[in-house]
Image (spheres, grey):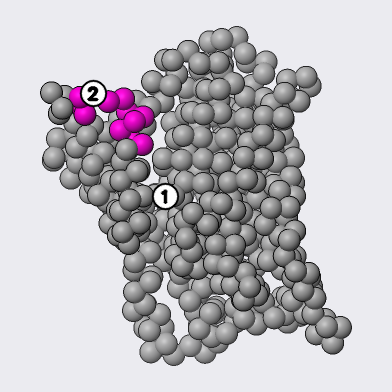
Amino acid sequence: MMVHFLFSISPTFKVLIVFVFIVIALKFKTPLGLAMLAGALAVGFWFNMPPLQILKSLGLSLVDETTLMLTLAIGLILLLSQSMSRTGQLQRIVISFRRRFSHYKLSLATFPALIGLLPMPGGAYFSAPMVDSVGTEELTAEHKTAINHWFRHIWEYSWPLYPGVIVGSALADLTLGKFVLVHIPVTLLTVVFGYVFLLRRLPSVQTTAKEVAIDTKSFFYESLPIIIIVALSIILGVLIAFARARLLFFEILPDRASLAIALGVGVLWVWKKNKMTTPQIMEILKNKTVWILIFTILGVMAFRQLLTDSGAVDGITQSLADKQMPMIAISMFLPFFVGMITGVTVAFLGTTFPILMALIAAQGLSENLVSYTVLAYCSGFMGTFLSPVHLCIIMTKEYFKADWAGIYRLLVPPAILTILLALGLYFLYLKL
């Protein structure tokens, strides 16, 4: 009787219960990768997947192109950040920036925002050491984590290089230009929200006039690896897309190939510029932190795979759509919830936007498409942003050794304001 009851629970509550157990496991210091893997197995069994199918899904998650490229990209990011940190180049960037731009709060926000221009998975881990170097001793680990995570993601709404922006515009049947345009106010105001909630009360530390007297060449030269990665990633992305359309061979290249190549070049540049020796490089490769984070990524991807293969995401999406809730409520809650449980922008877009667009058309609301798109995208991204399985927040938290409760205490207020902003834009765009 009890077993029948447990298996008859709605998909939404099943996933929520699994999340609760993952959080409890983390409280008992269980490694996140292991907790996510256990959660993936629990989802598989609870959604009646045969054991062999569960094993097959786990295997597929490991060899999936997205997982492989994600692991490669994040591995290279870790290698790059560790190399720049060990050689002192990261510190030199911070020092040259603070001498050129002496405002403390500006420095804290600018580093993650600059790195955020490059849509690299787990990129927050790259900017975390910069925020750490700039931050004073009085700034808590939770505060540094919140600042890094918030300003790293201000571009996710309107920067046309982000996969979420590209996929979102395509699924909503809006031109990329229009999608970007209607979301620009969100990017601008999230900067304001970040300042008000995360930076405003910090002391206005200024460097001396003597420190400011330095030319820009030092900052530019020390930042070359980052500039190379951003520029090369964009250039290669365009060239590969162009070649794919004309040459059959290039179709086999993975979607994130340009980013991986650019990161590889950036790593080699750092090694050559700083004359790193083989023993120094091997010491970084042996660092257990790198391998723990890679295992975490594999656990997260396994969890995502089982959520999809078990039918959990489809079940949650369909059950919410069947409840005949008002379209405005579905547009907010459905993407937010799926974003929260997957921690991946493209995941909430791919699972919820097709249903939302069909419901909008069925209810004769197509003329309000822009309003619903903005509301759904911002709500979904806030779910992704706050998700405990979002790689950026996981990696930043691990870097700073921060506490989950303290992080959310700082991030939830501006996140709520962002959703309210999206709601305001929804009503504004209805009238335009």
**Residue 290 in the image, given as x and y percentages of width and height:** 38, 70
Q: Where residue 235 sits: x, y (%)?
A: 61, 58
Label 1 neighbour load within 10 Å: few <14, some 14-19, many 20+:
many
**Relative horizontal placement of residue 333, taking residue 285 as reference (left or right):** right
Amino acid type, residue under disc 1 in the picture: Val
Q: Which mark is residue 8?
A: 2
Q: Position of residue 262 (x, y in %)?
A: 53, 65
Chief SS of the magenta region: helix
Q: In what quadrant of the picture does the C terminus appear? A: top right
The percent coordinates of residue 5 (x first, y second) are 20, 24
Of tags 2 and 1, the one toward the viewer is 2
Quote the CA–CA distance across marks 2 and 1: 26 Å
**Mark 2: amino acid:** Ser
Up-down: is 105 above or below 44? Answer: below
Q: Which residue is mark 1?
A: 389
Q: Which residues are magenta?
A: 5-16
Could you tell me which secondary element the residue under label 2 belongs to? Answer: helix
